[in-house]
Amino acid sequence: MCGIVGYIGDKKVAPILINGLKKLEYRGYDSSGVAIFGDNNLDVIKCKGRLSILESKVLENMPSGTMGIGHTRWATHGEPNDVNSHPHISNSGKIAVVHNGIIENYLKLKEFLQSQGYDFKSDTDTEVVAHLVEYHYKGNLIEAVIESINEIEGSYALGVICSDCPTEFIAARKDSPLIVGLGKGENFIASDIPAILEYTREIYILEDKEIVHLTKDDVKVYNIHGAEVKKEIFNVTWDVSSAEKSGYEHFMMKEMFEEPKVIKDTISPRIENDKIVLDNVSISKEDLDNIDKIYIVACGTAYHAGVVGKYIIEKLARIPVEIDIASEFRYRDPLISDRNLVIIISQSGETLDTLVALKESKKRGAKILSIVNVVGSSIARESENVLYTWAGPEISVASTKAYNAQLAALYLIAFDFAYKKGRLDEATYKSCIKELKSLPSKTEEVLANKEIIQKFASQHYNAKSIFFIGRGLDYALSMEGSLKLKEISYIHSEAYAGGELKHGTIALIEKGTLVICPVTQDDLVDKMISNIREVKARGAVVMAITQKKNKDMEKTADVVINIPDIDPLVAPVIAVTPLQLFAYYMAVEKGCDVDKPRNLAKSVTVE
Ligand code: AGP
């Protein structure tokens, strides 16, 4: 998730681009750049680091032009550095491109363009677009862009300028958001409303596969076939801060509603012709045959994703998995050798305990596979294999969408390993992939059901202590549900394996005690129903989360949150969202600072 902005008009464009990018920095902040048309050529200034570095470079030698595009980056392909920063320029220097999204077939296009003599400077997928537009450019910029995007697979919001076309520029979108800001004698493009709100409140919201031609006095929108599309003007009433949250009250809620897209972005680039292909991961069948044990090491929410990882890798690939908290792992002299694979999980890629655990494992000869959300982060740089979660920047301290993306990555790994080890026959492998592909739409269904959870939270936010109880994968989910609640609502909470209740904890259950139960594992539903009956017999109030098909739950729990029917094996990816929503509404009801909870930091880079 990056931020792009563009302007054409009579005003000096540089300050407008910098201003707009500042409002988009929540979308990505590891590098940035601008391309400005002035004095008959393209002025390109770009660099690694926060936007303030670019700003000082631009202020040092303010370009005079009145048309330009800008970009603030969240690296996906190619780590953050000056060369990989946007805009990317074609070989002739005539075409400049900024891009938000992932070009899935960039390697194929790159090969073709190199065979046509194009020379690539960066490791990015985006640079392909600059050369492709130049390849198709025959004097008509919009035609060249349309021809190019008809060859591109993946997601994009693009801004394209050409030094031969000083009075126009082009933008296009598919899957990544893009708006057009309508001004008087000036027009804008941006990834999101905050970037242009200062200048206009009249916008066009571009739909998928729409291309826009902008001059300072006119805006025309076309579809992928070049036919003009009539657009409706949308009047923005939000203020800047709510616009950054796309109208949501908190980044946490915005990020939960990004989960369908995040899960899709993490899964779809790794499925080619119905086979799982893990980019940046080279672990072959032979490697797996030489691995007699896997360790999963992480902290906090990432650790909880690892617990799900243990269950599914052991169940499917039949390789023993040990899950460990990094701060414990690094000091317990772990029995690690070159016959081990260590899977490291981290959203930020900077958590110190996890980083040291990784280095410790490498020192002892283990193979490393890291699941990370930040390209170029310390953990990513230290790892020989990195499977990136494409969750985009996660602003809220409480991790939500990154957890769902980590689960999606772990399922890809488990299915891949199991298939390579011959543990999955073709039919099962295909149905696993089918279930993975169904996750984004099923997560949307879950999110649409939020009102019931909000109502339940409004009736119970004064609870002093809450228990999460689950069995199997639901026990792993309960751990995450409990942490989410604790860290943003400050309510004491514990997660328990359903079968452990009778061994002590049930002593704490009394009239009105709140118990939250994810019940998504078919072979354990009856066991969980007995557990629920046990706590209800002691006066507990129970909210259960289960698939629609489990009708008996209606007669057992006080409140039932239905999730769409889904294979229990992958249910955690969608069943966690009601737990995240519950924690969110409890915190909102209590008036807590949801996005910046007390005593916590987004990335723990100290011991
Ligand atoms: C989760 O909501 C917390 N922010 C925290 O537990 C977090 O998961 C933990 O600090 C690990 O962070 P990482 O994924 O960036 O390594």
Image (cartoon, grey):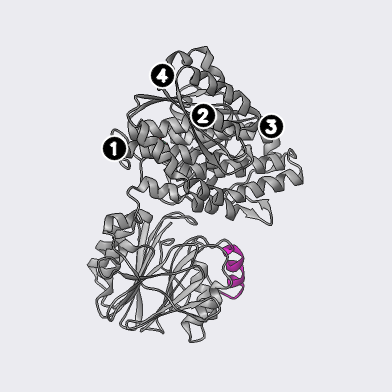
Q: Does the magenta stretch include residue 605?
A: no
Q: Give residue 557's mark.
A: 2
* Label 1 element class: loop
| Quadrant of the frame with the C terminus | top left
Residue 356 visible (yes or no): no
The residue stretch that appears in magenta: 105-117
Q: Where is residue 263 in the image (x, y as percent from the top left)?
A: 53, 49
Which mark sits nearer the N-terminus, 4 or 3? 3
* Label 4 element class: loop
Measured in 3D between alpha carbons, the distance from the residue under mark 2 to the one under mark 1, in whole angstroms, is 28 Å
| Quadrant of the frame with the N terminus | bottom left
Q: Disc 4 vs disc 1: which is toward the camera?
A: 4
* Disc 2 to disc 1: CB gap under 8 Å: no
Amino acid type at circle 2 is: Ala
Q: In which quarter of the image is ligand 1?
A: top left
Q: Which residue lies furthest to the front in this view?
A: 555
* Label 2 element class: loop
Measured in 3D between alpha carbons, the distance from the residue under mark 4 to the one under mark 3, in whole angstroms, is 43 Å
* Label 3 sits on residue: 318
Q: Nearer the viewer, residue 560 or 527?
A: 560
Measured in 3D between alpha carbons, the distance from the residue under mark 1 to the one under mark 3, in whole angstroms, is 44 Å
Measured in 3D between alpha carbons, the distance from the residue under mark 3 to the one under mark 2, in whole angstroms, is 35 Å
Q: Which of 250 and 14 is in front in this view?
A: 250
* Disc 4 to disc 3: CB gap under 8 Å: no
Measured in 3D between alpha carbons, the distance from the residue under mark 4 to the one under mark 1, in whole angstroms, is 26 Å
Amino acid type at circle 4 is: Lys
* Disc 2 to disc 4: CB gap under 8 Å: no
Q: Give residue 391's mark.
A: none
